[in-house]
Image: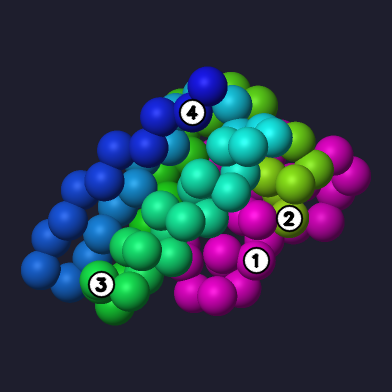
Amino acid sequence: MLRITITRSADAGTLKVEGRLAGLWVSELSRAATAARAERPRVVLDLGEVTFVDSEGIALLRALREGGIALAGCSSFVASLIDGGRP
């Protein structure tokens, strides 16, 4: 299960992500991030409460970061996977 809580300010949107980023939840986060990006010039994903990320989730996080979405609060393990480690 994955919970996505969206907080908006004048110039940014923050998506707090909690739970497991795997399977069908990967596409759900992709849709939420795309919608947030269309609404605000700056989007931040708060990954502090993510407990698991599968290989598709890592690929999505890499793509979102490359697309200009900031990643915050991820564990060192998840950060190392995003930066090129193997899932």
In the rendered structure, does residue 65 fall within the stretch colored magenta? yes
> Which residue is the site of mark 2?
59
Q: Are marks 4 and 1 in contact (CB under 8 Å)?
A: no
Q: Are marks 1 and 2 in contact (CB under 8 Å)?
A: yes
Labels 4 and 2: the sequence-earlier one? 4
Labels 2 and 3: the sequence-earlier one? 3
Q: Are marks 4 and 2 in contact (CB under 8 Å)?
A: no
Residue 40 pos. (x, y %): 25, 72
The residue at the point 47 percent across, 56 percent down is 31
The residue at the point 33 percent across, 63 percent down is 36
The Cα atoms of the two marked residues, 4 and 3, are separated by 23 Å
The disc label shown at residue 63, or none: 1
Labels 4 and 1: the sequence-earlier one? 4
Check disc 4 and report its element: helix, strand or loop: strand
> Which residue is the site of mark 4?
2
Check disc 3 and report its element: helix, strand or loop: loop
Labels 4 and 3: the sequence-earlier one? 4
> Which residue is the site of mark 3?
40
Q: Are marks 2 and 3 in contact (CB under 8 Å)?
A: no
Check disc 2 and report its element: helix, strand or loop: helix
Region in magenta? 60-87
Kind of residue sitting beneath label 4? Leu
